[in-house]
Amino acid sequence: MSAKIPVSVIIPARNEEANLPACLTSLQRADEIFVVDSNSTDKSVEISESFGAKVVQFEFNGRWPKKKNWSLDNLPFRNEWILIVDCDERITPELWDEIALAIENTEHDGYYLNRRVFFLGKWIRHGGKYPDWNLRLFKHKAGRYENLGTEDIRNTGDNEVHEHVVIPGKVGYLKSDMLHEDFRDMYHWLERHNRYSNWEARVYYNILNGKDDNGTIGASLFGDAVQRKRFLKKIWVRLPFRPFLRFILFYIIYRGFLDGKAGYTYGRLLSQYEYQIGVKLYELSSCGGQLNTTSKPTNTTQKFTTEASQTAT
């Protein structure tokens, strides 16, 4: 067996018994593994412990910090470098070899990993889904996840999903891919993206109301990949017919059709996801951004139905 690599892994988890065995098997070269669990009711804890992982329970206070930032602040890491891996992700032997070399480079404080996303058993290589860079390997004292001001929205989960790690120092890119494939059924994909759309609606609302730049990576057409994406998002949230445009971008412009039936299905689901965001954005706007208050919108049901459709499409 290869020597352990001085990296501490964080795996955020909740009821992930279907994904954890493959994930943990791929992480056996790591010196230390923490599974940060949210009171799972399945066999997640037993599976994690059987692979030698340290299980820590996270109690979410409903606001901030969420699971990953809490882990970075509170776990007793014995290594300088940490690697964040979701339960539906796997680190390949080739990527481990790169990681072992990368952490010896004293010029970098972090590294982006490229995810290879699988859907319905097929690699989604087109549609703008690849490359898919994520800053997951970094010195734990150097990086924290940004707060995008979404913690007041209910039912988004207790884990950072689309927030990015902010690292003031120099970062690099590794060549080998990290694999992303959820072994659970389609119900879980839909349930997860229903929660994500709550989060996205708040992000859209913050952008439209000028509340999106405080303490974040920021938006710049001439910045890095994340900053360019943020810049384009500021334009995107103001466009009409976003669900239709999202399908056209994924399936036609970025050639998602080359991924066959899986690509078509993925594109349709992304369009549906964008529609959900639009409806929830309208609901949020009609409440003045305060969905958690006891006041109710004055709009009639008919007006809500009509205007929500116009906003979302």
Image: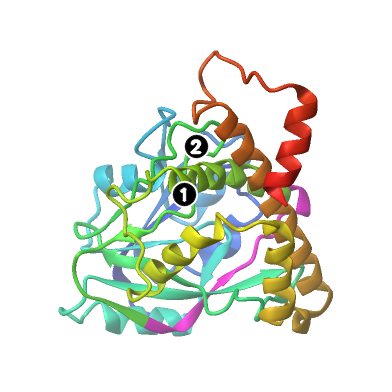
- Which region is colored magenta? 174-188
Point out the residue furthest to the right here.
261
- Residue 261 located within the stretch drawn in magenta: no
Q: Indicate the position of residue 189 as horizontal and vertical percent values.
A: 70, 52
Point out the residue furthest to the top here.
294
Q: Note whether residue 85 is visible.
A: yes
Whole-Å distance between the Cαs marked 1 and 2?
Answer: 8 Å
> Within the image, what quadrant is residue 267 found in?
bottom right
- In the image, taking residue 267 as reference, residue 34 lies left or right, namely left
Instruction: Report which residue position mark 1 lands on.
Output: 12
Quarter of the picture holding the N terminus: bottom left
Residue 200: image tag:
none
When the figure is inspected, residue 30 is found, relative to residue 298, above or below; the finding is: below
Query: Judging from the image, what secondary structure is the residue with disc 2 in?
Result: loop
The residue located at (55%, 55%) in the rendering is 237
Residue type, numbered disc 1: Pro
Q: Are marks 1 and 2 in contact (CB under 8 Å)?
A: yes
Instruction: Report which residue position mark 2 lands on.
Output: 38
When the figure is inspected, residue 133 is found, relative to residue 237, above or below; the finding is: below
- Residue 177 located within the stretch drawn in magenta: yes
Viewer-side residue, 222 vs 115: 222
